[in-house]
Image (tube, helix red, strand yellow):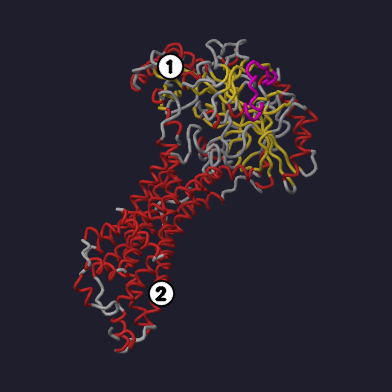
């Protein structure tokens, strides 16, 4: 074995160009595959970082005709008290809080959770303690647990943090614990946790706002838990028909909730893409190795003449391949780490679940090592097999220039090129579909001139205002002050920004027909439509005269009008929607809202042109406590940031202004995963195109070299240069055509798998598939033209000379 290694090293040193190309191709292929594998492993394969994670489940209310919905307070309490299958159950909701500590006031991302929250996950604190039973009761919930990262960043890792008092939404809270370093809670959106104590205004069944998780008791199966909870849901539906008739419960395993189906499919598609790229690289290297084997034929003959067995010759060639793959694997692991880090920086933080641990650890190392060994054998088998079949007597008699081409070797090289073309076609088809899909996304208008629209959060705690009239007065003053800032041409307040969903989903019924339905609900200032550039289609918009004490009015979007009124005129109709009581988690009595206008569909839940059904009310008639600004700038909106903060500070020095960004930036964040996925697949297909061109060029060059004598005879008999060029091009066209046929058939079947990742493009889009085929055919024929021209310039006298 040592002798084989020494000889292999000497042989590779004698072919520096081949060695460099082989190691580079393998490093790129193994590196890219290892990088994507680290994400697949971290998101899909690695065990969840919780104690017995298979016992953790998510709970949802199931509305009639639906599947999953957030939960009302009293329904959750019934589940908590009546279930027989959970060791611990916890509810929670996210919140933005104002924190005052060390003389600084800032906005923090928080969660309000039941006392058993950390017990469900099986997580202990690094400092202090977690919540105790009973600390989620009113008057006992003024305690808080910090994430490790937040403790380090905001408090400098102060070891005396436990026992200190900070103010959250102007209420004093004692820090009782810090979570462990590197836990999933460091990677989540929340920075701190406070017990969820239900106030009198939150004890309702008709307001759905909570999410729930639970830990199954030992030995309880998911089916048993569903049966028990279904019985409880049926009892609640029977006892409270006004709010819960036909409502049920859905229970999901933790992994099924954490990994979004689109993320799962994205990772699967990317892993398949890099896998195909690696196969393509190995095929290309096998072709190069076959050509190198032809050049080494005399060397093999000499070894065989000196007594080397066929097994020894095959082993020698395989040793060289494994050495190349080992070097490529080592470089691939290093390049894979850099690719992994780059992808982590490019991906939005919200895209991966907090439980995902993306690392180039021993698992990735073992994967890369397996790839290196596998690729070494894959591209080394063909040349090793042919080296072991060298005809000793025939090779000694024939000269290199006059020997007849080895038909089996030529046939194998042709097959390898066909495989390269087919794989390249598959990758290129996927890339063109993703590119067209992304361009469709980029072309969607979220608003008029979104680069000129600046948004900012103006979140206020429920405890800030003792009466809705105070909220109305505060936001009215703020809006008037902001509208007067130089450079602001329009300004509005809204309970929800574009692309970020409807703030509330509300059941409703129509007064004239008693038909029931549902729609998104958004409170806005009357200037919202004009600021965004949403055109009114019928009727009027909201005005400053739509205030408390006047007729409650709403504007509905086009999707709402088409769904519920079809060819009828919705103007003047009345929609009964329960009042959202500001500052409380309950709904008031039904209010007859009169429809006064129809507006074009806003891009709320994504970029779909159809839009989801929604209604808009004035913040004067339906006040909200947490609102956002939308400002239209006459120039660069970044110049408005400082004046905006100053204007708010003058009104209330303790009111933070958060999440300042343009509407264009919101859209960029929304499409960032698609942009990265498209870019990666584009790079894969570009490399595939290059490798396919190299493969075609290599095979045609080899064919010309092997047919030099034949070409010389044709030229001597009067064949023109054009006919000789055509001879080579026809061979290349045949290989390309067969490869494209196979690749297109595979692409048509495989691209259906990508349907969930496409926007505005069908998986079998003829333009995308046709463009991929045309580009690949063009590159292949251009690559074949160079050796074809070389063939046309062969001197017949030189070609016919015999050694």
Q: Which residue is mark 1?
A: 237
**138 or 295, nearer to the observer:** 295
Position in image of residue 86 (x %, y %): 41, 16
Looking at the picture, does residue 165 appear above or below residue 14? above
Badge 1 local density, few (<14 within 10 Å), some, or many (20+)?
some
For mark 2, what is the residue? 785
Residue 798 location in percent, x, y?
34, 86
Above or below residue 362? Residue 690 is: below
Between 29 and 781, the residue placed more toward the observer is: 29
Distance CA(mark 1)–CA(mark 2): 75 Å
**Of residues 726 and 36, which is closer to you in this image?**
36
- Above or below for 663 versus 412: above
Residue 802 has which mark?
none
Left or right, residue 424 beside residue 499: left
> Are there few (<14), some (14-19), or many (20+) residues within 10 Å of tag 2?
many
- Would residue 568 be visible to someone looking at this image? no
Badge 1 or badge 2: first in the primary sequence: 1
Q: Is residue 167 on the magenta stretch?
A: yes
Label tally: 2
Q: Is residue 400 left or right of residue 555?
A: left
Farthest-out residue, left: 393
> Viewer-nearest of labels 1 and 2?
2
In the image, 572 versus 273, the foreground residue is 273
Indicate the secondary structure of the residue bearing disc 2. Answer: helix
Q: Which residues are magenta?
A: 151-170
Against 42, is 741 above or below? below
Q: Position of residue 252 (x, y in %)?
A: 41, 27
Q: Where residue 632 appears, x then y in whole percent?
A: 71, 43
């Amino acid at each position: 074995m040592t002798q084989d290694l020494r000889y292999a090293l000497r042989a590779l040193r004698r072919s520096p160009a081949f060695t460099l190309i082989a190691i580079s191709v393998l490093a790129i292929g193994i590196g890219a595959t290892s990088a994507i594998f680290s994400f697949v492993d971290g998101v899909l394969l690695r065990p969840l970082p919780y104690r017995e994670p298979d016992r953790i489940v998510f709970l949802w209310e199931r509305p009639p005709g639906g599947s999953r919905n957030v939960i009302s307070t009293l329904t959750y309490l019934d589940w908590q008290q009546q279930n027989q299958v959970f060791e611990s159950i916890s509810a929670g909701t996210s919140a933005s809080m104002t924190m005052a500590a060390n003389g600084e006031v800032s906005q923090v991302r928080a969660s309000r959770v039941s006392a058993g929250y950390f017990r469900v996950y099986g997580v202990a604190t690094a400092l202090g303690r977690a919540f105790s039973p009973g600390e989620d009761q009113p008057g006992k919930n003024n305690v808080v647990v910090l994430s490790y990262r937040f403790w380090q960043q905001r408090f400098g890792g102060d070891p005396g943090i436990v026992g200190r008092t900070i103010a959250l939404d102007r209420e004093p809270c004692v820090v009782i614990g810090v979570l462990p370093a590197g836990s999933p809670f460091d990677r989540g959106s929340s920075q701190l946790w406070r017990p969820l104590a239900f106030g009198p205004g939150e004890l309702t069944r008709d307001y759905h706002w909570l999410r729930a998780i639970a830990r199954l008791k030992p030995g309880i199966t998911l089916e048993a838990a569903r049966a028990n909870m279904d019985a409880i849901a049926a009892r609640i539906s029977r006892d409270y028909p006004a709010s819960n008739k036909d409502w049920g419960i859905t229970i999901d395993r933790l992994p099924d909730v954490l990994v979004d189906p689109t993320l799962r499919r994205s990772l699967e598609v990317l892993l398949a893409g890099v896998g195909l790229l690696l196969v393509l690289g190995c095929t290309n290297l096998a072709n190069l190795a076959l050509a190198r084997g032809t050049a080494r034929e005399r060397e093999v003959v000499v070894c065989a003449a000196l007594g080397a067995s066929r097994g020894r010759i095959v082993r020698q060639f395989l040793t060289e391949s494994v050495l190349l793959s080992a070097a490529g694997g080592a470089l691939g692991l290093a390049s894979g780490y850099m690719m992994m880090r780059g992808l982590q920086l490019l991906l939005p933080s919200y895209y991966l679940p907090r439980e995902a641990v993306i690392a180039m650890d021993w698992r990735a190392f073992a994967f890369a090592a397996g790839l290196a060994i596998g690729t070494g054998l894959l591209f080394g088998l063909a040349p090793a097999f042919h080296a072991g079949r060298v005809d000793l007597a025939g090779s000694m008699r024939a000269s290199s220039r006059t020997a007849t081409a080895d038909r089996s070797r030529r046939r194998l090289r042709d097959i390898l090129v066909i495989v390269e073309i087919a794989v390249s076609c598959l990758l290129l088809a996927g890339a063109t579909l993703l590119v067209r899909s992304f361009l469709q996304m980029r072309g969607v208008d979220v608003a008029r001139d979104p680069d000129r629209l600046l948004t900012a959060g103006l979140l206020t705690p429920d405890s800030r205002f003792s009466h809705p009239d105070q909220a109305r007065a505060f936001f009215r003053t703020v809006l008037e002050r902001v509208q007067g800032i130089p450079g602001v041409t329009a300004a509005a307040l809204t309970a929800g920004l574009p692309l970020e969903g409807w703030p509330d989903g509300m059941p409703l019924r129509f007064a004239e027909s008693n038909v029931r339905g549902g729609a998104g609900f958004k409170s806005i200032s009357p200037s919202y439509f004009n600021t965004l550039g949403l055109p009114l289609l019928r009727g009027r918009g909201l005005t400053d005269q739509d205030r408390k004490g006047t007729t409650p009015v709403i504007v509905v979007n086009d999707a709402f009008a088409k769904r519920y009124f079809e060819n009828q005129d919705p103007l003047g109709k009345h929609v009964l929607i329960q009042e959202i009581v500001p500052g409380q988690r309950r709904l008031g009595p039904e209010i007859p809202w009169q429809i006064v206008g129809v507006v074009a569909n806003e891009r709320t839940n994504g970029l779909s042109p159809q839009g989801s059904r929604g209604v808009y009310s004035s913040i004067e008639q339906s006040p909200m406590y947490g609102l956002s600004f939308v400002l239209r700038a006459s120039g660069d909106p970044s110049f408005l940031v400082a004046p905006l903060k100053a204007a708010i500070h003058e009104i209330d020095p303790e009111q933070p202004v958060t999440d300042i960004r343009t509407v264009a930036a919101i859209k960029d964040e929304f499409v960032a995963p698609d942009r990265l996925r498209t870019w990666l697949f584009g790079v894969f297909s570009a490399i595939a195109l290059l490798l396919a061109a190299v493969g075609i060029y290599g095979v045609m060059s080899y064919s010309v070299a092997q047919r030099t004598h034949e070409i010389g005879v044709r030229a001597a008999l009067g064949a023109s240069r054009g006919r000789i060029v055509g001879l080579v091009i026809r061979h290349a066209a045949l290989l390309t055509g067969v490869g494209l046929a196979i690749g297109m058939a595979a692409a048509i079947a495989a691209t259906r798998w990508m349907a969930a990742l496409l926007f505005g493009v069908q998986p079998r889009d003829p333009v995308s598939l046709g463009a991929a085929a045309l580009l690949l055919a063009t590159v292949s024929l251009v690559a074949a033209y160079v050796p074809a021209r070389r063939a046309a310039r062969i001197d017949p006298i030189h070609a016919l000379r015999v050694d």
